[in-house]
Structure formats: C-alpha cells, structure tokens
Amino acid sequence: RNSMKLQNVLPNDIEKRSMEIIAEELGEVKLDEEKLSIIKRVIHTSADFDYVRTLHFSEDAVQKALEALKNGATIVTDTNMAKAGINKAGMDKLGCKAVCYMADPDVAAQAKIEGSTRAAACMEKACLIEEPVIIAIGNAPTALVRLDELIKAGKIKPELIIGVPVGFVNVVEAKELIMQAGVPYIVARGRKGGSNVAAAICNALIYKL
C-alpha cells in the first residue's frame, strides 16, 4: 500500500509552498537574487531543476528588460499559448501588451511568398513595432534564426530576447546564435524550453515590478 501522505495546503498557499520546496531542493546554489527569482519561476512551471544549469543571462539582461517594461514594452511571442500565459493584469498595470502574429493572414501570406515558417515572418512584422520590444520564443527556432538576420541588418533591436524554444531540429544551434547577436538575452541552452517557460520568464520579470 502506498504510504504517501497528501499535504494539507490552503489554495492561496500552494504557490508559496512550491517556492519553499524549490528553495529547499536548490540548497546552497549560489546565484544572484535577480536571476534566482526567474530560475525559480521556470522550475515552478516545469518541475525541472536542469534550468539552474542551462538558463543563461547576458550581462544586465534583467535590468534592461525591467526598464523596457517600465517604458510600455510590447512582448512578441511565437505562440498564442505563450501569449495566453503572460499575466495580463500585470501587463495592464505597466501599460505593456503581449502580441502573437502567428494566426495573422498577412504573416501566412508572407511566409508562403518567402518559403519560410510563419514564425520567421512574425519576426519581420515585429520590426514595425514602435514601442520597446521584448521577443519571447518558446517554440520556433526559425524565429531566432530570422531574428538574428534582422538584427544584423539593423531592422530590429530588441530590449531582450527570451530564447527558449523546445525541440530537436536547429534548436540548440539557434539558441547559441542568439547568444552571439549582441542584444540582451535569457536563453535556455540545450533542447529544453517551451511556451510555458517563455511565459514564466515574462511573468517573473513582470512580478519584479
């Protein structure tokens, strides 16, 4: 017979208790506080402690992202799932918005003309945004590859790239590419990631403000 006992935790305390368990299991991990809160939020979303090792931050990435959010940034995601996962009340308070262009007819048409993915075409549409831009990619490495080209061409300069696509084809390589692109980044090296992880990083930044 299974002798595991369920904890009696009040609904409002579940997240708090989860964070306590994460802190306990992290033990003596030495990370600066601004990164730690983001890593803990990603672990809370994924139950995967690998992110302690694999989540990489460019210098001042968090500071630059917070400045952008204070200045009414637009977050561009590569899935509607990631967009839906970003805390709307927090965004409204900051005067920010999240957008996803994946289902837009003009994006589909552009992708067809170019023979590219819609995710890549979305990055071209993101070049037209006038507010500070944060790009959050949880699914499509092709978006990161196109983004790298657009940055090199001087067509876009994101305040932050969250590069956490998940998968097996060009995922590892696209993340490494974006770490060399000369813009602030938070990247999950390796194969792991996902829309939920992209949203979790956005939320961790929003909650800091």
Image (spheres, rainbow, N blue to C red):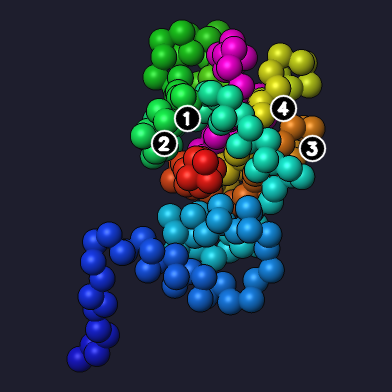
Query: Which mark is nearer the camera, 2 or 4?
Result: 2
Crowding around mark 2 (Cα neighbors within 10 Å: few <14, some 14 to 19, many 20+) is some
**Which amino acid, by three-letter code, is at mark 3?**
Gln
Residue at (48, 45) in percent of width and height:
207
**Residue 161 in view, yes or no:** no
Q: Is residue 10 above or below residue 57?
A: below
Lower sequence index among marks 4 and 3:
4
Marks 3 and 1 sit apart, C-alpha to C-alpha, by 30 Å
**Number of marks drawn:** 4
Lower sequence index among marks 2 and 4:
2
Is disc 1 placed on a helix, strand or loop?
Answer: helix
Q: For mark 3, what is the residue?
A: 180
Cβ–Cβ under 8 Å for marks 3 and 1: no
Is disc 3 placed on a helix, strand or loop?
Answer: loop
Marks 4 and 3 sit apart, C-alpha to C-alpha, by 9 Å
Residue at (51, 76) in percent of width and height:
24
**Which amino acid, by three-letter code, is at mark 4?**
Asp
Q: For mark 2, what is the residue?
A: 90
Q: For mark 1, what is the residue?
A: 94
